[in-house]
């Protein structure tokens, strides 16, 4: 039987979950904001995986966020038939999404810089 996770591992997982909640939306808007054409979910997931960051490997978590961003008017979507399987839903960023991406990017950078400044004095 595997060892049960200790308290520090549980706290780390909780922290990572809370941290990724907002960053997934920002990352999705950024990927679609830089895309030349609409993309479907699997393409978006593969793009995130290619960046090899904390968001890779969370494909199932992307779809609810894509739906929420669409419901907020930040993304448009449409369904197209697929030759190799079920129909695919393609997403593209809207003008409101581009404006939001600019605001969220500025907020992210300000937060990152502030946290980095606080963490600078901590030894690893």
Image (cartoon, grey):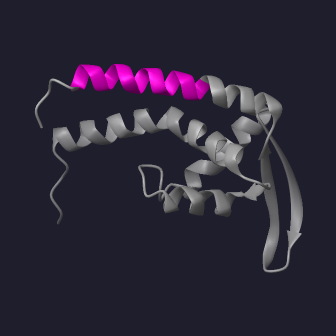
Whether residue 72 is visible: no
Q: Is residue 14 above or below residue 79?
A: above
Q: Residue furthest bottom?
A: 84
- Name the spot of residue 100 as percent of width and height, x first: 69, 26
The residue lying at 25 percent from left, 41 percent from top is 10
The residue lying at 73 percent from left, 32 percent from top is 98
Predominant SS along the magenta part: helix
- Name the spot of residue 31 as percent of width and height, x first: 64, 48
- The residues colored magenta run 104-119
Q: Residue furthest left?
A: 123
Q: Is residue 79 magenta?
A: no
Q: Is residue 117 magenta?
A: yes
Front residue of 87 and 111: 111
- Name the spot of residue 64 as percent of width and height, x first: 65, 44
Snapshot quadrant of residue 9 = top left
Snapshot quadrant of residue 88 = bottom right
Q: Is residue 49 above or below residue 82?
A: above
The residue lying at 87 percent from left, 58 percent from top is 79
């Amino acid at each position: 039987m595997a060892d049960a996770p200790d308290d520090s591992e549980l706290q780390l997982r909780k922290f990572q979950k809370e941290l990724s909640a907002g960053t997934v939306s920002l990352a999705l808007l950024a990927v679609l904001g830089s895309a030349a054409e609409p993309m479907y979910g699997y393409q978006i997931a593969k793009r995130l995986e290619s960046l090899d960051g904390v968001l890779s490997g969370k494909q199932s978590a992307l779809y609810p966020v894509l739906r929420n961003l669409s419901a907020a008017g930040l993304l448009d979507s449409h369904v197209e038939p697929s030759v190799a399987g079920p129909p695919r839903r393609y997403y593209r960023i809207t003008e409101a999404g581009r404006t939001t991406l600019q605001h969220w990017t500025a907020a992210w950078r300000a937060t990152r810089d502030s946290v980095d400044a606080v963490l600078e004095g901590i030894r690893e």
